[in-house]
Amino acid sequence: MGDAPFLSVEEISKAFHSDQVLNQVLDSISFTIQRGETIALLGESGCGKSTLLNIIGGFERPDQGLVKLQNESITKPSRKAIMLFQHYGLLPWKSALKNVEFGLESSSLSAKERAERARHYLDLVGLSGKSQMFPHEVSGGMKQRIAIARALAPQPELILMDEPFAALDTFNRYHLQDQLLNIQAKEQTTIVLVTHDIDEAIYLADRIFIMHSNPGRIHHEIHVELSKPRDRSHPDFYTYRKQILDEFHFSRQESAIEFHI
Ligand SMILES: Nc1ncnc2c1ncn2[C@@H]1O[C@H](COP(=O)(O)OP(=O)(O)OP(=O)(O)O)[C@@H](O)[C@H]1O
């Protein structure tokens, strides 16, 4: 593999036709990501974040360009890249444990190994005592923990997250963001995260790609140089926040409120 980047997105363009109008959603997007990095895609609604994530995951085909994961072209979904959505996608008739095991069904693990692996990841997300509970018996935050355990259990090379915590209240969101950081530090998972939440991007990401729309392009890349775990109330955090608000022309003198674009 040599020095090839872990993930490379090369000159990706994508258009959709709607009402006989061609909508150029992504225009020649390129970047590379190293193993273990967390990247946040931040941009206003409709700028093409989810489309880009879907192309990286192999769920959507670009019109031009290609995506390479560990130097292999991605042309269809694979177990190497797993997508985590905002709305859990749990199977209501299966317990937490069985939901996590379900993500391992196509693996070569024995039933015993699958159960052990599932328990390990439920432990990592803080649900060791809840493995026999069903989705309707647990809170939204716990449902998303189960979904995270299920995404992690197959040990994918890459996790793609489409606004994973957007449906949660602030406290649950903060807890899950911390857990994700812990797990990421342990497992060196590579993450590409789509978010509307500026604070979430600054808290989690090593680099933030600011996207602009019509057509969707990466307008600016911000390296978040703060060491992790980060302090949401530190003045440096606010410096990044101001920089991002400036990008979207939302700045006022002081912006202390939580801001979603
Ligand atoms: N399958 C599709 N067919 C037609 N148009 C589509 C399709 N998927 C996405 N689009 C259009 O592409 C544009 C980008 O959509 P996309 O969901 O990628 O944006 P986004 O930045 O993720 O938005 P949001 O933040 O609101 O989720 C939108 O104008 C959307 O209507």
Image (spheres, grey):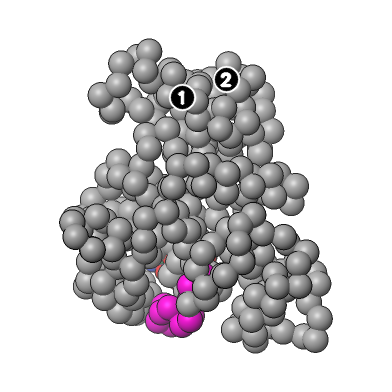
Q: Nearer the viewer, residue 91 or 186?
A: 186
Task: Choose top left, top right, bottom left or bottom right for residue 202.
Answer: bottom right
Residue 92 in sight in this render:
no
Residue 118's tag is 1
Residue 183 left/right relative to 238: left
**Left or right: 46, with 77 as reference point:** right
Residue 28 higher or lower than 63, as above or below: below
Which of the image's four quarters has the C terminus? bottom right
Rendered residue at 48%/52% (across/down): 161
| Mark 2 vs 1: CB contact within 8 A | yes
Give the magenta part as a residue range: 208-220
Q: Quadrant of ligand 1?
A: bottom left
Q: Can you say which quadrant of the picture contains the N terminus? A: bottom left
| Point 44% across, 38% down: residue | 152
Give the residue at x 81% y 81%: 254
**Residue 75 x, y percent position in the rendering:** 21, 55
Q: What amino acid is found at the position of numbered circle 1 in the picture?
A: Ala
Circle 2 SS class: loop
Circle 2 residues within 10 Å: few <14, some 14–19, many ≥20: some
Question: Is disc 1 surrounded by few (<14), some (14 to 19) or many (20+) residues within 10 Å?
Answer: many
Image height of 21 relative to 129, above or below: below
Q: Residue 213 in the image: x percent, y percent?
A: 47, 80
Find the distance from the CA under tag 2 to the CA under tag 1: 9 Å
- Mark toward the start of the polypeptide (2 vs 1): 1
Mark 2 lies on residue: 131
Question: What is the magenta segment's predominant secondary structure?
Answer: strand
Three-letter code for the amino acid on which mark 2 is drawn: Ser
Q: Which percent across, then down, holds residue 44?
A: 55, 73
Q: Residue 16: horizontal and vertical position, in percent?
A: 32, 71
* Apparent side of residue 7 relative to residue 162 in the rendered image (left or right): left
